[in-house]
Image (cartoon, helix red, strand yellow):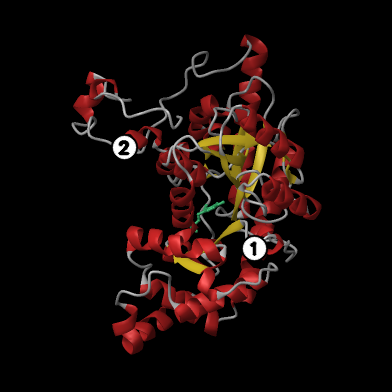
Amino acid sequence: MTSSQSPQPAQHRPGSEPGRQKLDPHIDRYAARTAGMTASEIRALFAVASRPEVVSLAGGMPNLAALPLDSLSAQMAELVAEDGLVALQYGSAQGVPALREQICEVMAMEGITAHPDDIVVTVGSQMGLDMVTRLFCDPGDVVIAEGPSYVGALGSFAAYQAQVVHVTMDDDGLVPEALREALAQANQQGKRVKCLYTIPNFHNPAGVTLSVERRAEIVEICAENDVLIIEDNPYGLLGFDGQTYPSLRSLDPDNVVYLGSFSKTFASGLRVGWVLAPHAVREKLVLAAESATLCPPTLNQLVVSKYLATHDWKGQIKTFRENYRERRDAMLSALEQHLPAGCTWTQPEGGFYVWVTVPEGVDTKAMLPRAVTARVAYASGTGFYADGLGSRQMRLSYCYPTPERIREGVRRLAGVLESEMELMRTFGSVTSRAVSGPQFPGPDTA
Ligand code: PMP
């Protein structure tokens, strides 16, 4: 959608056909921008994939089993008993000051020097993504993003009617030359590129990491072209060897908006993340946060703050890393052992995901119902692109299941792929039309 598109007359609105109208009597009332808001494929998948008989390699839920629940619950009780009138009250729109200071210490682990004044605490980094898009993107503005990219970010960009242009990655992350080309092409087409959205570390979904050499180059390209960088870094401390990389923000503090989160390093359900903005942006960001939530939840912020002050949080991250490394190893060796020839995959050195490419002719979206029937689920690649690519790819998550379940899931997946390829050899390309599988149940029927 472009900025020249104005709201359409009611009878022509997207989705306002008579059948749809019956389903939703409000269909003609929605703002034009809602046309881009569709349920992600991954959300539809969650309901089916969470059945116990299905090995889900689809979702990206952090594995929280190693958290010290007893001491955390004692601490939470203490917080309410001793500080309840603060913890249960509204707080500052920008977030609890003590927590913002602690966030500076967390970010220092990745080379960032920041002032607590430039941090805005958010309800997960997802809220940060929403706010930053709201602040910077008009309908039709271009956001450049890696292809594939994080589903939740694509959702935010669609909600604000920004146009996503994907640039390719290789094993060293985003390819600078591809970025240059995308910028030149957008320029030629008279489009305004506002931002580069990037996940430099242990990418979701690609599992790759941007090489150190490329970081400076990408920062430079963006500065030269007047393009703001949105650096999304929820996995940066989950390198399996404890390795960290210089953040883009540390290379150009004035042109990078940095998104951080406690979802992967502590507890996703607390929904505590943050934005570190260039100083000049901070005020608008606080206003945007205020209009979204008034203030982030005080109790949850105090829980995180107390946890950071009293627990060995670095030791806890190390434990998480070890758990994820064991699962990554189980997945990679199972892929090596079971997947048919012609499949390739990335080799993540941290984070949660492996990105698999299947042989030409196999369509991972069409294959999914057959995989679920075989009791394994994955996220098909098309959900990670704004432009329909990804049908030969899938994301496999190793973060949540046990290593045994991961091995079993990959074994089942390999069986499905084998029979898909057998059908392909017999009948040519396999699509949902060519081979009927069971109806894939949506969230309502699961
Ligand atoms: N960015 C990326 C790349 C993610 O993978 C996720 C969660 N899967 C988020 C942002 C959102 O994280 P949260 O809102 O839990 O902080």
Which quadrant is home to the N terminus?
top left
Left or right of residue 48: residue 178: right
Label 2 sits on what residue type? Asp
For the residue pair 188 and 151, the one nearer the viewer reads as 188
Dot 1 lies on which element?
loop
Between discs 2 and 1, the one toward the N terminus: 1
Image height of 149 relative to 250, above or below: above
Image height of 386 relative to 217, above or below: above
Quadrant of res 191: top right
**Residue topped by disc 1:** 253
Dot 2 lies on which element?
loop
**Residue topped by disc 2:** 444
Q: Position of residue 389 (x, y in %)?
A: 59, 28
Q: Position of residue 178 (x, y in %)?
A: 72, 36
User: Is residue 233 visible in this depiction of the protein?
Assistant: no
Ligand 1 within 8 A of label 2's CB?
no
Left or right of residue 340: residue 316: left
For mark 1, does the 10 Å Cα neighbourhood hold few (<14), some (14 to 19), or many (20 or more) residues?
some
Quadrant of res 251: bottom right
Single out the residue that lies furthest toward the bottom. Answer: 82
For mark 2, does the 10 Å Cα neighbourhood hold few (<14), some (14 to 19), or many (20 or more) residues?
few
User: Is residue 151 visible in this depiction of the protein?
Assistant: yes
For the residue pair 137 and 442, the one nearer the viewer reads as 137
For the residue pair 75 and 235, the one nearer the viewer reads as 235
Marks 2/1: CA distance? 45 Å
Left or right of residue 243: residue 414: left
Image height of 164 relative to 198, above or below: above
Total tally of numbered discs in the picture:
2
Which quadrant is home to the C terminus?
top left
